[in-house]
Image: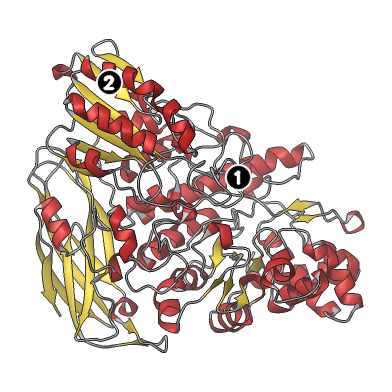
Amino acid sequence: MDRSKARENAEKLVAQMTVEEAASQLSYGAPAIERLGVPAYNWWNEALHGVARAGTATSYPQAIGLGATFDPELIQQLGDVSATEGRAKYNSCSAHGDRDIYKGLTFWSPNINIFRDPRWGRGHETYGEDPVLTAELGKAYVRGLQGDGEVMKSAACAKHFAVHSGPEAERHYFNAEANAKDMAETYLPAFEALVKDAKVEAVMGAYNRTNGEACCGSKTLMVDLLRGKWGFEGHFTSDCWAIRDFHEHHMVTDTPEESAALALKMGCDLNCGNTYVYLMKAYEQGLIDEADIRKAAVNLFTTRYLLGIMGEGSEFDKVPFTAIECKEHLDIARKATEECCVLLKNDGILPLSKDKLNTIAVIGPNANSRISLIGNYHGTSSRYITVLEGVQDEVGDDVRVLYASGSHLFKDREEHLAVSDDRIAEAVSAAECADAVLLVVGLDETMEGEEGDTGNAAASGDKLDLLLPLCQRKLMDEVMKVGKPTVICLMAGSSIDLGEAGEKANGILLSWYPGARGGKTIADMLFGKVSPSGKLPVTFYHNSQLDEMPAFTDYAMKGRTYRYFTNEPLYPFGYGLTYGDVNVTAATASKVGEDVQIEVKYANNGKACTDDVIQVYVQNEGSANAPDNARLCAFKRIHCAAGQEGSLILTVPAKHLLVVNEAGEWVDEGKKVFYVGLGQPDSRTETLTGKKSLRIEL
């Protein structure tokens, strides 16, 4: 069914409703209208990295890990997995009369905000700090969720529109101020791409204000830009209880009726929260009219008709319950974990050889932790495989595995630090008895996440610094003193500075939050069954560099992310080692219409088969409006066997060749210079990899 037909059906249906009935449909828990045959529907569902909060589902890496794959084709497959399992759940639940929360087909995913500051607790819900990478992966996930058939498989939602990346503790009253250049260059491109290119069905507003306007009631964002300039035709939803913030925290209105009226007038069709229970009072007070209510209802029912869930039926009604966690889906999830892990350091210790080990010590608070596998906004897996379990299964009876947690994950009061030391002696003893040590440290969703979300260590899920908790640092220091060959497996969703332990370790593997069964894949990687190939979608800074960065509350991009950070980072955006030795051997550029094609030749001179990611960066030399550093403009994941050569052609869209001036206008300035390689064209990447990007002038 095309949109025009779905809208026609929606208009006919809404026209039969009383104004009270139409208003009742604008809250996320929409009741049934039995006289019209309208079933109840709950709009709130989540699928950030698998269907969440609705029981068993295939679990794959947290979104930041998916960002590290640099693989839109895979991300689209994962979107289809979520849509399929969402249909299976919807079908089975509806058949039993269950139309409750998290049982619908409207997924409030993906989160395409820009991870601009490493302290932001929700940053691991995003695809990283780069607008181009975020847009490409976001579009892919939307296409996977929505499908390309006559009936929409599920409805995706781009969130949080538009300028939202902390601080979490202040989001209900915070005003994010961004100039025209930063808005056009950084904060808006991914949303525009998902609306225009991927035809995302829904957009969710943010909690905060942007340049003085509440994001869920912003004329600039919602009327002028989203539905005006971009031509968005889907529905708009508030973040949960964000409209209540209008009068309680932002003080842009005085009453709930005024808040409801402002949101509705600006085009917020759906209220996640309870402020729209005041819609009829706002109507009676003359703050809104009947047409406003019916317009929003039509937008919402258009989506329901597009999904084929208004009684007409579709092919997706046949998706069985057994599709959930089927082998095909688990295989795709495993592939995502293989592609997401980033090898930060390797002096030759990796891959480990079982033949050379009699005993390995697996140490650390995340070694046998299920929570550290799954990130936030997660579903339930029928099986979890921790890193410890993965290593035990991999080595079997051939290698003795000694385990010690070594420390608690986190203690938030100084007086508890002594208690945190009570497991260090056990860890040191295990290290002393081992031929090699695997230190599994990091964070989990209780330490970095969303304000008010389950289990956060504080009211805010933001980080105060880039260090691991003191108890883990003390553990690492004591284990390192033993002097055994040591690999650190870091499980976290953001930039972490491991300090002296990172300098001393022989290898560092960043696994993010790798999914419920991620421990098996990590073990496969540690023992060489698969090569790491992920690339950092965010810059890893030295903790000391936080003092050089703008304040967390400053939304100006100068000094932030790889495009505007002018000092040398700990690990650069786009960086990641492999067990192979892939090199870009040649590259040429040519104009094709307004776009540019980059032809690349590459070869794997190593002894291991591996994936890698060809990356193209562009700089507009001579332009005062260009970012300080060359920026990503094209990328492609490749697979290259040992000794293999290959070639590919990458297209750089014309818009990626432009820069943004202070008025927020995209302009053509400067000489276009391209850098083609396996990471950024910066000195730190060259130092860490020993490889230099090829420079091409057009």
User: How far across and down, in percent of the image, does residue 420 sit?
Assistant: 42, 28
Q: Earlier in the sequence, mark 1 or mark 2?
A: 1
Tell me the quarter of the image containing the N terminus.
Answer: bottom right
Packing grade of label 1 (10 A; few <14, some 14-19, many >=20) is many
Residue at 81% across / 52% down in the picture? 39
Estimate the x, y position of residue 635 in percent, counting from the top left. Answer: 27, 61
Residues at discs 1 and 2 in contact (Cβ within 8 Å): no
Tell me the mark number nearer the camera, choosing from 1 and 2.
2
Say left or right for 270 vs 664: right
Q: Nearer the viewer, residue 351 or 255?
A: 255
User: Which residue shows up at 85% across the image and 77% down it?
Assistant: 290
Residue at screen point 72% across, 39% down: 93
Q: Is residue 217 left or right of residue 459?
A: right
> Which mark identifies residue 86?
1
Label 2 neighbour load within 10 Å: few <14, some 14-19, many 20+ = many
* Mark sitting on residue 428: 2
**Residue 659, quarter of the rendered image:** bottom left
In the image, taking residue 157 as reference, residue 561 lies left or right, namely left
Checking the image for residue 603, the label placed there is none
Secondary structure beneath dot 1 equals helix
What is the distance, in whole Å, between disc 1 and disc 2 at their CAs? 46 Å
Q: Which amino acid does the dot numbered 2 rest on?
A: Val
Query: Could one spot residue 525 in this view of the protein?
Result: no
| Residue drawn at the location 76% of the way across and 52% of the way down | 41
Viewer-nearest residue: 445 or 534: 445
Give the percent coordinates (x, y) of residue 133: 36, 62
Q: Which of the two residues, 549 or 392, is positioned nearer the viewer here?
A: 549
